[in-house]
């Protein structure tokens, strides 16, 4: 795979802007792993529309959804090598390449609302975290929402003990691994594109995801029960290859920044509605039974997961966890 990425990266050089190719459009390959009709999918299409409009066709954005170019584990390396120019990986993806700070977003029950999330991502904490990406050959441009996660399995999930012995698909994240181990479950790292089949064949018993992702991937067809926990958040960081971005003419980069700002506002505006619509559609289909936890059940889940904050302090950063928690709580007071 690495040899193939080097070959593609070498070929991509010819798509980079240069004085000798003034008439040729600058190509931005924007790769992602979810369906086109998800918040991220629609956000990437909006960026394509606006980028091409604001640059008067000097930039052409090619969007590759549904892992058609690269799967979860491959896409960041592809970006670093220049085989693609832009991605929108979930926050969890940066831990395995050494930027563990973004795993703070994986901590369960840390962000109680979108308002609290905005205070974090749009404030000093979020801006500082984006600068950490520079050392890895990429620039963080924006935070895009997906939404809040629900739990699903082929048995009812009410109390923490209901998770014992089950295998749950997770993204690659030490926080998520620890979360399910605290519940007595076995976490299984798996590419997003492989989850439906794994659920269908019983390779894993359950998963956690947003309604939009579950519905567009038809996970409700292979999960008997979904518990509306809203326990965790899935979001993305739109990143661009640093060398490519800094090599763009200043006027082009400014137009692309404008397109990104507007597509970010669009993507984050529609994400909540997309999840509400997906939830309604799954309820209407009746293929999975929805469980609304009681206050006592939610309190039991939070109590079991509380040790994660101390356990992950050395990995994610104690001060960062405290800062995010304080900022999030301040947004709800």
Image (tube, grey):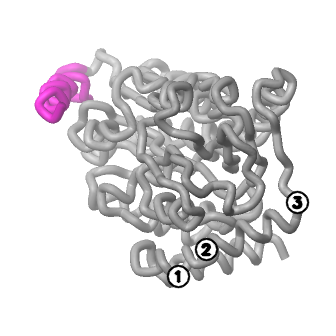
Q: Nearer the viewer, mark 3 or mark 2?
A: 3
Q: Nearer the viewer, mark 1 or mark 3?
A: 3
Closer to us: 303 or 205? 205
Tell me the crowding category of disc 1: few under 14, some 14 to 19, or many 20 or more residues within 10 angstroms, Cα based: few
Tell me the crowding category of disc 3: few under 14, some 14 to 19, or many 20 or more residues within 10 angstroms, Cα based: few
Real-space CA distance between mark 2 and mark 1, rounded to the nearest whole angstrom: 14 Å
Closer to us: 167 or 276? 167
Q: Is residue 13 visible?
A: no
Q: Determine which of the numbered discs, if any, sits on residue 324 in the image.
A: 2
Real-space CA distance between mark 1 and mark 3, rounded to the nearest whole angstrom: 26 Å
Q: Determine which of the numbered discs, if any, sits on residue 294 in the image.
A: 3
State the image coordinates of residue 326 (x, y, percent, origin top left).
67, 80
Q: Which residues are magenta?
A: 1-21
Q: Quadrant of residue 295?
A: bottom right
Furthest residue to the top? 23
Lateral position of residue 91 relative to residue 293, left or right = left
Closer to us: 316 or 258? 316
Q: Could you tell me if the residues under marks 2 and 1 are in contact, i.e. CB atoms within 8 Å?
A: no
Look at mark 1 in the image and give the residue it sits on.
310
């Amino acid at each position: 795979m690495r040899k193939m990425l080097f070959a593609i990266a070498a070929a991509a050089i010819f798509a980079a802007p240069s004085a000798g190719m003034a008439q040729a459009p600058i190509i931005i390959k924007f790769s992602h792993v979810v369906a086109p009709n998800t918040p991220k999918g629609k956000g990437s299409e909006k960026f394509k529309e606006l980028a091409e409009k604001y640059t008067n066709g000097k930039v052409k954005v090619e969007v590759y959804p549904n892992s058609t170019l690269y799967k979860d584990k491959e896409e960041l390396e592809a970006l670093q090598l220049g085989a693609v120019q832009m991605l929108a990986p979930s926050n969890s993806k940066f831990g395995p390449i050494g930027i563990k700070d973004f795993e703070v977003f994986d901590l369960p029950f840390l962000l109680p609302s979108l308002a609290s999330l905005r205070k974090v991502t749009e404030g000093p904490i979020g801006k500082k975290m984006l600068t950490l990406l520079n050392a890895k050959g990429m620039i963080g441009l924006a935070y895009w929402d997906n939404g809040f996660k629900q739990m699903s399995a082929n048995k009812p999930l009410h109390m923490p003990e209901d998770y014992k012995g089950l295998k749950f698909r997770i993204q690659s994240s030490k926080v998520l691994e620890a979360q399910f181990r605290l519940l007595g479950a076995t976490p299984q790292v798996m590419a997003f594109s492989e989850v439906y089949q794994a659920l269908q064949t019983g390779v894993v018993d359950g998963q956690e995801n947003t309604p939009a992702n579950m519905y567009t991937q038809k996970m409700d067809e292979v999960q008997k029960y979904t518990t509306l926990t809203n326990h965790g958040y899935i979001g993305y960081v739109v990143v661009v290859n640093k060398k490519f971005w800094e090599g763009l003419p200043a006027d082009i980069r400014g137009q692309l920044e404008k397109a990104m700002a507007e597509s970010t506002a669009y993507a984050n505006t529609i994400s909540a509605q997309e999840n509400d619509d997906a939830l309604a559609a799954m309820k209407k289909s009746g293929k999975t039974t929805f469980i609304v936890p009681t206050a006592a059940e939610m309190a039991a889940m939070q109590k079991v997961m509380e040790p994660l904050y101390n356990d992950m302090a050395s990995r994610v950063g104690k001060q960062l966890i405290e800062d995010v928690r304080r900022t999030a709580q301040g947004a709800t007071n």
